[in-house]
Image: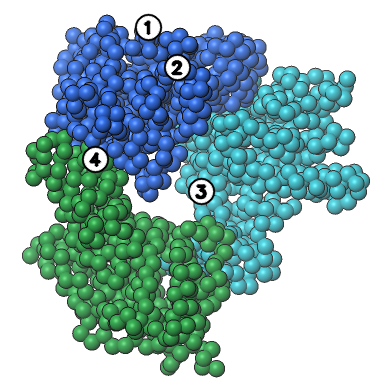
Chain colours: A cyan, B blue, C green
Amino acid sequence: MGESVHISKGDEFALLPQTAKGTEMGALLRRNWHPVALSRDIGAGVAKPIRILSEDLTLYRGYSNQAYLIGGRCAHRMTALHSGWVEGDELRCMYHGWRYNGSGQCTEMPAEKDRLTTTVRIPGYPVHEYNGLVFAYLGDGKPPAFDLPRKEVLERPDSDIMLFSREQTWPCSWFQHVENSMDAVHVSFVHRKGNIGPFGEAVTAAIPDLTYEETDAGIRQTAVRAENNVRISDWTFPNNNHILLPMYDKELPWCDLSIWMVPRDDENTVRFQLYSVPRVDEEADQRTLRHFETYGGYDPADHHDELVFHGKYPEEPFLQLTNAQDYVASVCQGAIVDRASERLGKSDAGVALVRRIFLRELAALRAGEAAKTWRKLDHAVDLPRQVPQAAEA
Amino acid sequence: MGESVHISKGDEFALLPQTAKGTEMGALLRRNWHPVALSRDIGAGVAKPIRILSEDLTLYRGYSNQAYLIGGRCAHRMTALHSGWVEGDELRCMYHGWRYNGSGQCTEMPAEKDRLTTTVRIPGYPVHEYNGLVFAYLGDGKPPAFDLPRKEVLERPDSDIMLFSREQTWPCSWFQHVENSMDAVHVSFVHRKGNIGPFGEAVTAAIPDLTYEETDAGIRQTAVRAENNVRISDWTFPNNNHILLPMYDKELPWCDLSIWMVPRDDENTVRFQLYSVPRVDEEADQRTLRHFETYGGYDPADHHDELVFHGKYPEEPFLQLTNAQDYVASVCQGAIVDRASERLGKSDAGVALVRRIFLRELAALRAGEAAKTWRKLDHAVDLPRQVPQAAEA
Amino acid sequence: MGESVHISKGDEFALLPQTAKGTEMGALLRRNWHPVALSRDIGAGVAKPIRILSEDLTLYRGYSNQAYLIGGRCAHRMTALHSGWVEGDELRCMYHGWRYNGSGQCTEMPAEKDRLTTTVRIPGYPVHEYNGLVFAYLGDGKPPAFDLPRKEVLERPDSDIMLFSREQTWPCSWFQHVENSMDAVHVSFVHRKGNIGPFGEAVTAAIPDLTYEETDAGIRQTAVRAENNVRISDWTFPNNNHILLPMYDKELPWCDLSIWMVPRDDENTVRFQLYSVPRVDEEADQRTLRHFETYGGYDPADHHDELVFHGKYPEEPFLQLTNAQDYVASVCQGAIVDRASERLGKSDAGVALVRRIFLRELAALRAGEAAKTWRKLDHAVDLPRQVPQAAEA
């Protein structure tokens, strides 16, 4: 067991947004799988540069259809590898043709008669595709099994659900996104602004009574606004949240939304959203498909000045407005919020809890103790749907 | 009385552009009212972020029509307050609904049962609206009375004058703007370039004989180019200049122009211009109104590359060209001019004087002595109108 | 003789990209003439700001048609001089009219009765125009004679050749450009990507046998791909390369291309390209003229995102695609490539040699020893034209 090290409050806050390899939080985050791209954005034979956890990497898909994640630069003269080309399931550097397999092993040096290939290796990370998302494990050693607390709703048969995925990149720290998930009060203000859609209507402006409970998988949050207005969500350590949402049309059944907040680096976050939408009938399903096609490509970051400086919000509530409202609230805290200046209250219990849990885990790592083994919930009960106020009337 | 502290020339120069709260110049500037916005840009119920003297602030106007200037961020979770909304004469944060009055006092914390409001306060600064400009006092203690050396010309009845205001933000230090005001020689070169308008014609290319005299309010500058070509201006400490200008049409009487050069931060300056134009007759007044509407919205900063790299200047001389010429001269000195490398001459007496006055005032503050109490001029004689060369012929 | 100073590998690498006046490499580079602009871009009476070797300068052309290169700022109040205007063969500052001649000597201070002019001087550098390029010598003392190893091909009579010049600015270190010239292997990969033009076809994908030999003028590089496929180029110290190229149409004779890679600063390079194209007949020459007019204005830096992030390359191979491919390979190494992390092989002999030569010259300068006197090649034999593969068939 390591020695206890005293870390001051201000120092602790400074740990939270860190993501690079050498940092404590960077090490903790690297013990988990993270989505790094949408499957549909990386076709066979395509290579693209991505930045995840402050590392510049190359994601490519071989002609076998397998995706690979390797280092960003060729070991030879350091050219970015995504500018090269895929051959079979390997990637060749455009500059002098050095070739790498999906584990980062160099397999060809054409101008060197392949003399040195065995000793040359760049980073290579395990990749796992799941429901249209490309996940990767950037840690050392054997990756944990890929799991989620309520995979069931994402894995129902095609005849029952439709899945939709989105990717956005917001210019603020990933931990602000996590805190926003653990903060049910914000819904009563952030999402009541502007054109209030079904979500705003369903939630009402009433301030909820809040309960937060650490689970085997993360944190369960319960917000009670009225007897028939109970909102529960399951947050999974370290950066996934699972909520229920009304759809764009009140007549349709609610959908499940699983969101990952993945650090691009300390000041930028990639949000991957996976919607599991219950099928209704041919006509409604087609309408939903068109709705996602029409509105789902929105990224509030593309409308930053409009939203932040001119207060002009999009009209569509389900896929745009709610999103844009969270964007403004989070990004306007600053790229890394000044936590030392905050004034937290009792209603910030969720924010305080999630910080405590992360700091506890970091302390365990620092002391050489075993960090908590997070695992799937044994009993992932159905999350309740609130009855909208309008519907009550 | 404090001890005298030796400050080297280079160190003194470094003091001049500083504007932040902790700096000496920042403290000196904070003893004065500064315009911070145009009244017309902040309607009832509107909040906008502004940056003045290196402070990020929120300017909003209540539904009573009163304007308020408070801190930029909510004390709770640090979200920028301008993204919230006005309720009555208070401003509510969009994130969790904390509400602030115009003095920066927190008045509501909805999710906290208002438990803590009395102890929570953000900055709040006195605001004074004057002739279409919103002024604020960012210092400590009681603000001085709002005054100007020749308020008379700005306060004549509506039947005598028309007022026009403009706001521009230029990417260079406020002190370069002040120096440019104290430098009548520049007129013979900067404003003789390109399409010379009535102003250039009136002033002529003759090098003036210069006199600078410290007054109760600031500095009076006299530039004599010929017996019938005497130009006088009154500069008010710390950052206002008052000049007379020919209009866009030689047949019209000259107008008064009052300009404030307000630091946004050390490297950016907001220029507020207030024109007091004598009424002539219905037709001429309408023409002047249209002229301001057509050309007054120009900001040379929006045309930076064109002006600085391609030497393409606007045609209209009165509201655009003169402005653009000053822009190029000031901004091309660099964001903060390297004063240690300059070679000043006798013709730079005004620049030297205004620096000496500021450094004297800073030294007094540093030594704990009383700084000068600037006040309105007792005898603000009429400023002479030069007779244009063309008119002489 | 000075003392030997030990410089570590990492420190040596850090010397290579440096260009500023106080640096060792900056001093070495300043012993040579460098092109700084295209003659056609600076008409009589025009002044423009340029940045070369990390110095901000003003290039202007007098009405006598002579070009001059002087300091970037007026000595008086530091305004950028290019915003002034040319009078005769001198340049007047726009701010207060100080005037400078082409050697940087101040010749007029209108508001000072010219009292101080003799003591005021800004930098002024010798300029030499050659074949449509403006060269300058930024060093101390007498400049060396302007020379090139194979000036003959650039100086043949107008009836024999047509000259075309281009200027581009790429966001990476000049030394990466030099290394790319000393690296014949890259041709087999970089220029085989995408739409392979005559150049790609001529060179083939075969890996060459390479020989590098230090000459009186620089380095001669020989790349043998087959008996009838021998490619030779002459690189001139410190930053010029001379190669032969097939034209846009296989039927036309090959042309000579002389390229200078001139540091703008440590992280940006200005590439000047001078094509010497043999005349064929009226029709073909007109076609070539139109080809350069249509495609020659391309700068890959204007298409950075398209090239680097979307892999979209231009179609035209001769003036655009080859260029764009080199751009991606060089710029994707990073603004300054991390040489400490590289893995060089035997095929990098040219890169290793050119580094050794520069480091040897820097060591000589450091030790106060005589650096090598580079001079024109005594016997600049004709460079061979490869026989394209297609033509062999």
Residue bearing mark 4: C78
Q: Position of residue A273 (x, y in %)?
A: 70, 44
Look at label 1 and name its amino acid.
Ala
Q: Is C348 located above or below residue B149 in the figure?
A: below
Residue B197 placement, left or right of B125? left
Image disc number at residue B279: 2
- C-alpha separation, residue under disc 3 versus residue under disc 1: 54 Å
Q: Residues within 10 Å of mark 1 (few under 14, many from 20)?
A: few
Is residue B128 at all visible to an observer of this figure? Answer: no
The answer for which chain carries disc 3 is A
- Pointer 2 and pointer 3: residues touching (CB < 8 Å)? no
Residue bearing mark 3: A54
Q: Is A157 located above or below residue A307 in the figure?
A: below
Q: Residues within 10 Å of mark 3 (few under 14, many from 20)?
A: some
Residue C33 placement, left or right of A118? left
Q: Position of residue C365 (x, y in %)?
A: 16, 63
Q: Secondary structure at mark 2?
A: loop
Look at label 3 and name its amino acid.
Ser
Residue bearing mark 1: B145
Dot in front, 3 or 1: 1
Instruction: Give the quadrant of the N terminus of chain B.
Output: top left
Q: How many marks?
A: 4
Q: Residues within 10 Å of mark 4 (few under 14, many from 20)?
A: many
Q: Position of residue A323 (x, y in %)?
A: 68, 36
Dot in front, 2 or 4: 2
Confirm whether circles 4 and 3 share one chain.
Answer: no
Image disc number at residue C72: none
Is residue B25 at all visible to an observer of this figure? Answer: yes
- C-alpha separation, residue under disc 1 versus residue under disc 2: 30 Å
